Amino acid sequence: MLRKGIVLVIMMILLFTGCAGADGNKLPIDLSPGSAYSGQFESGNDQVYEDPTIRVERHKIESASDEFNCWVWYAIITIADPSQLRTYPANGSDFCKTTRTTIDKLSKRVRAVLAINGDYPVAFSGNASVSYVLRQGEVYRDSVAEGLDILLIDEDGDFHVLTRDEDLAGIDKTQIDGKKVINAFQFGPALIIDGKPVDDETLLDKSHSPTHAEPHSKHQRMVFCQIDTLKYMAVCVANWGATLPTMRDLVLYLAPECRVAYTLDGGESTQMTFLGRIFNNTGGSNADPRPLADIIYFASAQ
């Protein structure tokens, strides 16, 4: 009887320990920060941060060293749990307020291993004033900018695109394929959908992009991609950067297996941090970073 009791106690301890370990790799779906990280920033074009829950490889390609004739910064991110892909507003509570803060401050506030600019959801004149805003599982604005693709990220961390020719206002955007949507963005357009590149004609159609995106011109741009399950890429180019078709080709050059690629805000808002420091430069060597309204970031969950 005593031996059976001891075995039962051991089994309960192992079960509790296993559950605690699983929960320890998850972050809450809210606006709280990620876990503290211990990585160190070093100079150089290629750096890696890794702990048991996340791996980030960040790279820089100088303009003279690639076929796209522009400076390229990109990062490959692999996470252990979907909750490590997170969003955060500049004022810390509402994505539709006009508060703006520099990305390095926001990145440090939420302990981001890697952070990029979002889709600029704050209210202002133009189609972004009515764009759909769902972040960290909560709807902040339930309207749509007709004609602009919507990116949905579900509870498993998978990307889905609702294209401009769908009934964007009528579709339930809080769930997709039976899964809860955790984050949604409406800027675009999508460059790759379900592994298929979007054609030039669609990308260069001005009605398919925000009014200030100028798809045919070379500009600073940020593209957010899902490569595989819990594997992502963020890629951006400097001034004067790339057209939308060139950005699509750049993504395929860096990650031929890319599932979905989606364009976020660009221009001087094109910003990326690694371990709290900005490592791309789209506004000139002496330019201060433009304050942002929101960020997308990846956090440790160790």
Image: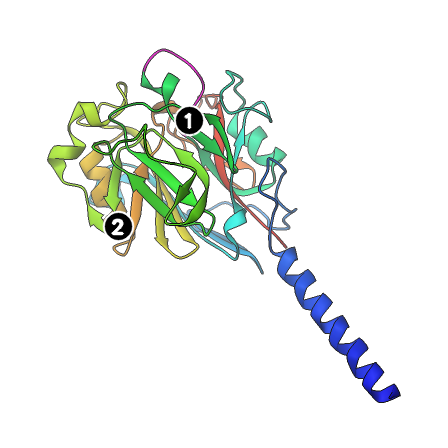
Q: Which stretch appears magenta? A: 119-126
The numbered mark at residue 20 is: none
271 in the magenta segment = no
**Type of amino acid at the residue the image marks with label 1:** Ser
Residues at marks 2 and 1 touching, judged by CB atoms closer than 8 Å? no
Q: Please name the residue shown 24% across and 40% down the image.
A: 191
Which quadrant holds residue 119?
top left
Q: Is residue 61 visible?
A: no
Relative height, residue 149 to residue 301 (above, below): above
Q: Residue furthest right?
A: 2
> What colour-coding does the image apply?
rainbow
Secondary structure beneath dot 1 equals: loop
Please identify the quadrant where the N terminus is shown. bottom right
Q: Please name the residue shown 72% across and 67% down the image.
A: 17
Disc 2: which residue: 194
Secondary structure beneath dot 2 equals: loop
Disc 1: which residue: 285
Q: Please name the residue shown 45% across and 19% down the image.
A: 122
**Type of amino acid at the residue the image marks with label 2:** Asp
x, y percent for residue 100: 52, 19
